Amino acid sequence: MAVVVAPLLSLDASGMIGDTLEYKCGATVAVKKRKNPGEDNEIFNDQQLLFKEAATAWRGLEPAVRQAWRDDGWWLPPSHVGHGVQVFINGYQCWMSYYLRFGPGNWENYPNPPPERA
């Protein structure tokens, strides 16, 4: 059964017929609904959980430690991004980068910025 908004043959009509057919403004358009990429992908789920863990750890840091990370933003060299383009990453992005790369407690001076960057 189609669920349509507005009279079926009007220009305002739109709706879905089942999971794969979409009706828009007097035309029937075949649309394949995309499944959530994480439903069956174990690696995606693990990475998503690690990212959530890192964000939670960031919120749990002492304000002084968070400020130290914020004060320690980095300019990435042009070779990392492309010809003549420099990108600045802020303290939160630096924290996420280290946390996702090394994990909790796996760099010197954790949770403070690492010594080579401090």
Image: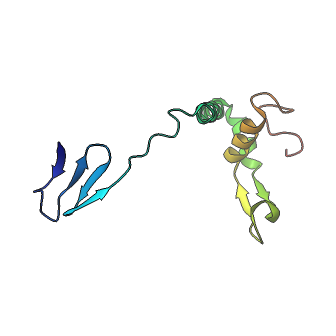
Q: Does 37 appear above or below 11?
A: above
- Name which residue lies at 77% across and 71% down: 83
The single residue placed furthest to the bottom in the displayed view is 84
Q: Is residue 14 left or right of residue 96?
A: left
Q: Which coloring applies here? A: rainbow
The quadrant holding residue 92 is top right
What residue sits 71% from the left and 37% below the top? Answer: 100
Q: Nearer the viewer, residue 108 or 50?
A: 50
Q: Residue at x 73, y 46 (%)?
A: 94
Q: Quadrant of the N terminus?
A: top left
Give the percent coordinates (x, y) of residue 107.
84, 33
Q: Residue furthest left?
A: 7
Quarter assignment of residue 62:
top right
Q: Residue at x 75, y 28 (%)?
A: 104
Location of residue 65 in the rendering, given as x and y in whole percent from the top left corner = 73, 36
Front residue of this view, candidates 46 and 31? 31
- The answer to whether one can see residue 67 in this image is no
Residue 88 in the image: state x and y as whole percent. 72, 58
Nearer to me, 117 or 46: 46
Given the current orientation, which residue lies at the most extreme right position?
116
Q: Position of residue 22 (x, y in %)?
A: 28, 53
Quadrant showing the C terminus = top right
On the question of residue 19 being in view, the answer is yes
The number of callouts visible is 0
